[in-house]
Amino acid sequence: MAKERLEQETEDGFSDDEIIIRKKKAPEVREGVTPAVVLKTAAAALEQLRAKRPLLQCMTNSVTSGFVANALLALGGTYAAVEDMSEASQFTAVADALLVNVGTVTKPQADAMRAAVSHANMGGKPWALAPSGVGPLPLRTFTARELMRRFPALIRGNAAEISFLVNNEVPPRGAAPSSDDVALAAARLAGVTHAAVVVTVTGSKDYVAAEGTPLVAVLNGSPMMSRVAGTGCVQGAVAAAFLGALGAKARWESAVAASLVVSLAGEFAAAKAAGPGSFVPAFLDALASLTPEDVLKSGKVKIVPVA
Protein backbone atom coordinates (compact mmCIF):
# COMPACT_ATOMS: atom_id res chain seq x y z
CA MET A 1 0.00 0.00 0.00
CA ALA A 2 2.82 2.40 0.85
CA LYS A 3 4.40 1.80 -2.57
CA GLU A 4 1.17 2.58 -4.43
CA ARG A 5 0.64 5.76 -2.39
CA LEU A 6 4.19 6.92 -3.07
CA GLU A 7 3.84 6.23 -6.81
CA GLN A 8 0.63 8.26 -6.94
CA GLU A 9 2.16 11.16 -5.03
CA THR A 10 5.22 11.31 -7.26
CA GLU A 11 3.10 11.55 -10.42
CA ASP A 12 0.79 14.29 -9.16
CA GLY A 13 2.03 17.64 -10.38
CA PHE A 14 4.30 16.34 -13.16
CA SER A 15 3.91 17.70 -16.65
CA ASP A 16 3.20 15.16 -19.40
CA ASP A 17 6.76 15.54 -20.66
CA GLU A 18 8.18 14.87 -17.22
CA ILE A 19 6.12 11.69 -16.84
CA ILE A 20 7.29 10.50 -20.25
CA ILE A 21 10.92 11.14 -19.28
CA ARG A 22 10.40 9.28 -16.00
CA LYS A 23 8.83 6.22 -17.66
CA LYS A 24 10.56 6.09 -21.01
CA LYS A 25 12.83 3.12 -20.33
CA ALA A 26 13.08 0.12 -18.04
CA PRO A 27 15.75 0.21 -15.35
CA GLU A 28 19.15 -1.26 -16.08
CA VAL A 29 19.57 -4.55 -14.26
CA ARG A 30 22.96 -4.88 -12.61
CA GLU A 31 23.99 -8.50 -12.15
CA GLY A 32 26.97 -10.07 -10.46
CA VAL A 33 26.97 -7.68 -7.52
CA THR A 34 29.06 -9.25 -4.75
CA PRO A 35 30.79 -7.71 -1.73
CA ALA A 36 34.09 -7.81 -3.64
CA VAL A 37 32.52 -5.94 -6.58
CA VAL A 38 31.11 -3.29 -4.24
CA LEU A 39 34.50 -2.70 -2.61
CA LYS A 40 36.31 -2.53 -5.97
CA THR A 41 33.70 -0.08 -7.24
CA ALA A 42 34.11 2.21 -4.23
CA ALA A 43 37.92 2.04 -4.35
CA ALA A 44 37.96 2.96 -8.05
CA ALA A 45 35.51 5.80 -7.43
CA LEU A 46 37.74 7.27 -4.73
CA GLU A 47 40.68 7.23 -7.10
CA GLN A 48 38.61 8.99 -9.78
CA LEU A 49 37.38 11.65 -7.36
CA ARG A 50 40.92 12.48 -6.27
CA ALA A 51 42.01 12.71 -9.91
CA LYS A 52 39.16 14.99 -11.01
CA ARG A 53 38.67 17.13 -7.88
CA PRO A 54 35.02 17.82 -8.73
CA LEU A 55 33.51 21.21 -7.97
CA LEU A 56 30.36 20.81 -5.90
CA GLN A 57 27.70 23.50 -5.64
CA CYS A 58 26.36 23.23 -2.10
CA MET A 59 22.98 24.51 -0.96
CA THR A 60 23.14 22.99 2.45
CA ASN A 61 22.30 23.04 6.13
CA SER A 62 23.67 26.24 7.70
CA VAL A 63 24.43 24.41 10.96
CA THR A 64 26.93 22.09 9.27
CA SER A 65 28.07 23.99 6.18
CA GLY A 66 31.59 24.64 7.49
CA PHE A 67 32.08 21.00 8.45
CA VAL A 68 30.80 19.90 5.05
CA ALA A 69 33.16 22.28 3.24
CA ASN A 70 36.19 21.09 5.19
CA ALA A 71 35.24 17.44 4.68
CA LEU A 72 34.97 17.87 0.91
CA LEU A 73 38.31 19.65 0.75
CA ALA A 74 39.93 16.98 2.93
CA LEU A 75 38.62 14.19 0.72
CA GLY A 76 39.82 15.84 -2.48
CA GLY A 77 36.86 17.71 -3.89
CA THR A 78 36.19 21.43 -4.11
CA TYR A 79 33.27 23.37 -2.70
CA ALA A 80 31.20 26.48 -3.38
CA ALA A 81 28.31 27.68 -1.25
CA VAL A 82 26.02 29.48 -3.69
CA GLU A 83 22.48 30.09 -2.46
CA ASP A 84 21.23 33.39 -3.89
CA MET A 85 18.50 32.82 -6.49
CA SER A 86 20.32 34.42 -9.43
CA GLU A 87 23.77 33.18 -8.51
CA ALA A 88 22.57 29.64 -7.82
CA SER A 89 21.05 29.35 -11.28
CA GLN A 90 24.17 30.71 -12.96
CA PHE A 91 26.68 28.67 -10.97
CA THR A 92 25.02 25.36 -11.79
CA ALA A 93 26.50 25.59 -15.28
CA VAL A 94 30.01 25.78 -13.77
CA ALA A 95 29.71 23.10 -11.09
CA ASP A 96 30.20 19.38 -11.71
CA ALA A 97 27.28 18.49 -9.43
CA LEU A 98 24.76 20.04 -7.06
CA LEU A 99 23.85 19.23 -3.46
CA VAL A 100 20.49 20.32 -2.05
CA ASN A 101 20.07 19.85 1.71
CA VAL A 102 16.81 21.19 3.18
CA GLY A 103 17.89 20.97 6.82
CA THR A 104 17.60 24.71 7.56
CA VAL A 105 15.71 25.82 4.47
CA THR A 106 13.96 29.20 4.31
CA LYS A 107 11.40 30.25 1.70
CA PRO A 108 13.94 32.29 -0.33
CA GLN A 109 16.37 29.37 -0.19
CA ALA A 110 13.65 26.96 -1.32
CA ASP A 111 13.04 29.15 -4.37
CA ALA A 112 16.78 29.21 -5.09
CA MET A 113 16.94 25.42 -4.73
CA ARG A 114 14.14 24.98 -7.26
CA ALA A 115 15.92 27.26 -9.70
CA ALA A 116 19.26 25.50 -9.27
CA VAL A 117 17.68 22.07 -9.70
CA SER A 118 15.88 23.19 -12.86
CA HIS A 119 19.12 24.48 -14.35
CA ALA A 120 20.98 21.33 -13.31
CA ASN A 121 18.39 19.18 -15.05
CA MET A 122 18.45 21.32 -18.19
CA GLY A 123 22.25 21.21 -18.26
CA GLY A 124 22.52 17.49 -17.59
CA LYS A 125 24.26 18.02 -14.25
CA PRO A 126 23.64 15.38 -11.55
CA TRP A 127 22.29 16.49 -8.20
CA ALA A 128 21.72 14.92 -4.81
CA LEU A 129 18.89 15.57 -2.35
CA ALA A 130 19.34 15.41 1.42
CA PRO A 131 15.83 15.54 3.00
CA SER A 132 17.18 16.53 6.41
CA GLY A 133 14.56 16.77 9.14
CA VAL A 134 11.53 16.03 6.95
CA GLY A 135 8.33 14.97 8.64
CA PRO A 136 7.52 17.17 11.63
CA LEU A 137 8.10 20.59 10.02
CA PRO A 138 6.10 21.72 6.98
CA LEU A 139 8.47 23.92 4.95
CA ARG A 140 11.34 21.48 4.68
CA THR A 141 8.91 18.60 4.20
CA PHE A 142 7.05 20.31 1.35
CA THR A 143 10.32 21.42 -0.25
CA ALA A 144 11.89 17.96 -0.06
CA ARG A 145 8.78 16.26 -1.44
CA GLU A 146 8.59 18.72 -4.31
CA LEU A 147 12.27 18.39 -5.16
CA MET A 148 12.04 14.61 -4.93
CA ARG A 149 9.83 14.78 -8.05
CA ARG A 150 12.48 16.63 -10.03
CA PHE A 151 14.78 13.71 -10.81
CA PRO A 152 17.56 13.69 -8.20
CA ALA A 153 20.33 11.27 -9.11
CA LEU A 154 20.79 10.37 -5.46
CA ILE A 155 18.88 10.75 -2.18
CA ARG A 156 20.66 10.49 1.17
CA GLY A 157 18.89 10.46 4.53
CA ASN A 158 18.67 8.77 7.89
CA ALA A 159 16.22 6.00 8.69
CA ALA A 160 13.41 8.29 9.87
CA GLU A 161 13.73 10.62 6.86
CA ILE A 162 13.72 7.90 4.21
CA SER A 163 10.90 6.04 5.95
CA PHE A 164 8.83 9.22 6.07
CA LEU A 165 9.26 9.89 2.36
CA VAL A 166 7.84 6.44 1.64
CA ASN A 167 5.24 5.97 4.37
CA ASN A 168 4.30 9.59 5.16
CA GLU A 169 4.34 8.80 8.88
CA VAL A 170 6.42 10.49 11.56
CA PRO A 171 7.59 7.96 14.18
CA PRO A 172 7.11 8.87 17.84
CA ARG A 173 10.02 10.71 19.36
CA GLY A 174 12.68 8.24 20.42
CA ALA A 175 11.25 5.45 18.28
CA ALA A 176 13.04 4.15 15.21
CA PRO A 177 11.85 2.03 12.29
CA SER A 178 13.19 -1.51 12.18
CA SER A 179 16.17 -2.32 10.01
CA ASP A 180 14.01 -4.46 7.73
CA ASP A 181 11.48 -1.64 7.30
CA VAL A 182 14.25 0.81 6.45
CA ALA A 183 15.71 -1.55 3.86
CA LEU A 184 12.31 -1.95 2.23
CA ALA A 185 11.67 1.80 2.29
CA ALA A 186 15.03 2.52 0.63
CA ALA A 187 14.34 -0.02 -2.12
CA ARG A 188 10.85 1.40 -2.73
CA LEU A 189 12.08 4.98 -2.84
CA ALA A 190 14.79 4.04 -5.35
CA GLY A 191 12.20 2.25 -7.48
CA VAL A 192 9.83 5.20 -7.64
CA THR A 193 12.31 8.07 -8.01
CA HIS A 194 14.96 6.20 -10.07
CA ALA A 195 17.55 7.74 -7.73
CA ALA A 196 20.16 5.78 -5.82
CA VAL A 197 19.30 5.92 -2.11
CA VAL A 198 21.73 5.93 0.81
CA VAL A 199 20.09 5.54 4.21
CA THR A 200 21.91 5.52 7.56
CA VAL A 201 20.27 3.08 9.94
CA THR A 202 22.80 3.36 12.78
CA GLY A 203 26.29 4.79 13.08
CA SER A 204 27.56 1.41 11.91
CA LYS A 205 25.09 0.45 9.20
CA ASP A 206 24.00 2.01 5.93
CA TYR A 207 21.85 0.62 3.17
CA VAL A 208 22.40 1.50 -0.47
CA ALA A 209 19.50 0.90 -2.86
CA ALA A 210 19.22 1.42 -6.60
CA GLU A 211 16.68 0.28 -9.14
CA GLY A 212 17.61 -3.04 -10.73
CA THR A 213 20.45 -3.61 -8.25
CA PRO A 214 20.68 -5.81 -5.14
CA LEU A 215 20.45 -3.97 -1.84
CA VAL A 216 23.84 -3.41 -0.22
CA ALA A 217 24.47 -3.09 3.51
CA VAL A 218 27.62 -1.19 4.54
CA LEU A 219 28.72 -2.25 8.02
CA ASN A 220 31.54 0.19 8.74
CA GLY A 221 31.27 3.29 10.90
CA SER A 222 31.05 4.07 14.59
CA PRO A 223 28.43 5.20 17.13
CA MET A 224 30.64 8.27 17.62
CA MET A 225 29.39 9.54 14.26
CA SER A 226 25.97 10.24 15.77
CA ARG A 227 27.48 12.30 18.61
CA VAL A 228 28.60 15.19 16.42
CA ALA A 229 26.45 17.30 14.12
CA GLY A 230 26.99 16.90 10.43
CA THR A 231 28.34 13.48 9.52
CA GLY A 232 25.11 12.73 7.67
CA CYS A 233 25.32 16.06 5.85
CA VAL A 234 28.91 15.21 4.93
CA GLN A 235 27.80 11.88 3.50
CA GLY A 236 25.21 13.59 1.30
CA ALA A 237 27.80 16.07 0.06
CA VAL A 238 30.37 13.34 -0.58
CA ALA A 239 27.76 11.41 -2.57
CA ALA A 240 27.14 14.48 -4.72
CA ALA A 241 30.90 14.94 -5.17
CA PHE A 242 31.19 11.37 -6.42
CA LEU A 243 28.40 12.11 -8.90
CA GLY A 244 30.44 15.08 -10.08
CA ALA A 245 33.52 12.90 -10.52
CA LEU A 246 31.87 9.83 -12.05
CA GLY A 247 28.99 11.33 -14.02
CA ALA A 248 25.21 11.36 -13.85
CA LYS A 249 24.83 7.71 -14.87
CA ALA A 250 27.02 6.45 -12.02
CA ARG A 251 24.32 6.73 -9.37
CA TRP A 252 24.83 3.41 -7.65
CA GLU A 253 28.61 3.70 -7.87
CA SER A 254 28.48 7.14 -6.25
CA ALA A 255 26.16 5.90 -3.52
CA VAL A 256 28.25 2.90 -2.47
CA ALA A 257 31.44 4.97 -2.63
CA ALA A 258 29.99 7.72 -0.42
CA SER A 259 28.66 5.23 2.11
CA LEU A 260 31.93 3.33 2.40
CA VAL A 261 34.24 6.34 2.36
CA VAL A 262 32.39 8.28 5.05
CA SER A 263 31.75 5.20 7.19
CA LEU A 264 35.39 4.11 7.04
CA ALA A 265 36.60 7.61 7.87
CA GLY A 266 34.27 7.64 10.87
CA GLU A 267 35.48 4.22 11.99
CA PHE A 268 39.15 5.17 11.67
CA ALA A 269 38.60 8.50 13.42
CA ALA A 270 36.71 6.96 16.32
CA ALA A 271 39.59 4.56 16.94
CA LYS A 272 41.88 7.55 17.58
CA ALA A 273 39.51 10.04 19.22
CA ALA A 274 39.01 10.45 22.96
CA GLY A 275 35.50 11.84 22.45
CA PRO A 276 33.38 14.03 20.18
CA GLY A 277 35.72 17.02 20.49
CA SER A 278 38.70 15.15 19.09
CA PHE A 279 36.60 13.10 16.69
CA VAL A 280 35.96 15.94 14.22
CA PRO A 281 39.61 16.73 13.41
CA ALA A 282 40.39 13.01 13.37
CA PHE A 283 37.52 12.49 10.92
CA LEU A 284 38.84 15.19 8.58
CA ASP A 285 42.31 13.65 8.79
CA ALA A 286 40.85 10.22 8.03
CA LEU A 287 39.06 11.53 4.94
CA ALA A 288 42.29 13.10 3.73
CA SER A 289 44.42 10.00 4.28
CA LEU A 290 41.92 7.33 3.19
CA THR A 291 43.18 5.30 0.24
CA PRO A 292 41.56 2.93 -2.24
CA GLU A 293 43.57 0.18 -0.55
CA ASP A 294 41.92 1.06 2.77
CA VAL A 295 38.53 0.59 1.14
CA LEU A 296 39.48 -2.82 -0.25
CA LYS A 297 41.10 -3.98 2.98
CA SER A 298 38.76 -2.59 5.64
CA GLY A 299 35.39 -2.19 3.92
CA LYS A 300 32.65 -4.46 5.24
CA VAL A 301 29.58 -4.99 3.06
CA LYS A 302 26.96 -7.64 2.43
CA ILE A 303 24.21 -8.18 -0.09
CA VAL A 304 20.73 -8.12 1.46
CA PRO A 305 17.66 -9.81 -0.05
CA VAL A 306 14.57 -7.61 -0.10
CA ALA A 307 11.11 -9.15 -0.28
Image (spheres, rainbow, N blue to C red):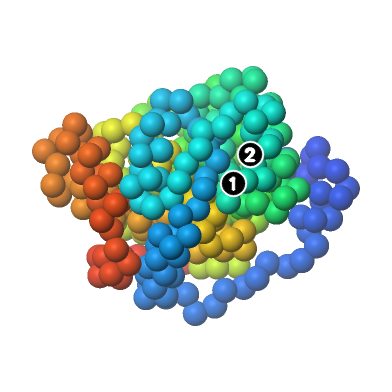
Q: In this view, does 28 lie to the left or right of 287?
A: right
Task: Give the residue furthest to the bottom.
Answer: 32
| Label 1 residue SS | loop
Q: Which mark is residue 238?
A: none
Q: Mark 2 points at which residue?
A: 91
Left or right placement of residue 224 versus residue 181 in this view = left
Classify residue 207 by image quadrant.
bottom left
Tell me where residue 48 sits by quadrant: bottom left
Closer-to-camera residue (183/51): 51
In the displayed structure, does residue 271 sit left or right of residue 99? left
Dot 1 amino acid type: Ala
Q: What residue type is labelled 2?
A: Phe
Between 298 and 5, the one lying in front of the other is 298
Q: Do the residues labelled 1 and 2 touch (CB within 8 Å)?
A: yes
- Neighbor class of circle 2 (other Cα within 10 Å; few <14, some 14-19, many 20+) is some
**Residue carrying label 1:** 95
**Element type where label 2 sits in the image:** helix
Q: Can residue 302 be seen in this view?
A: no
Using the image as rendered, state which of residue 236 and residue 33 is in the foreground. Answer: 236
The Cα–Cα distance between marks 1 and 2, rounded to whole angstroms, is 6 Å
In the displayed structure image, the side of residue 24 where residue 125 appears, left or right: left
Q: Which residue is drawn at 70% across and 54% down?
A: 124
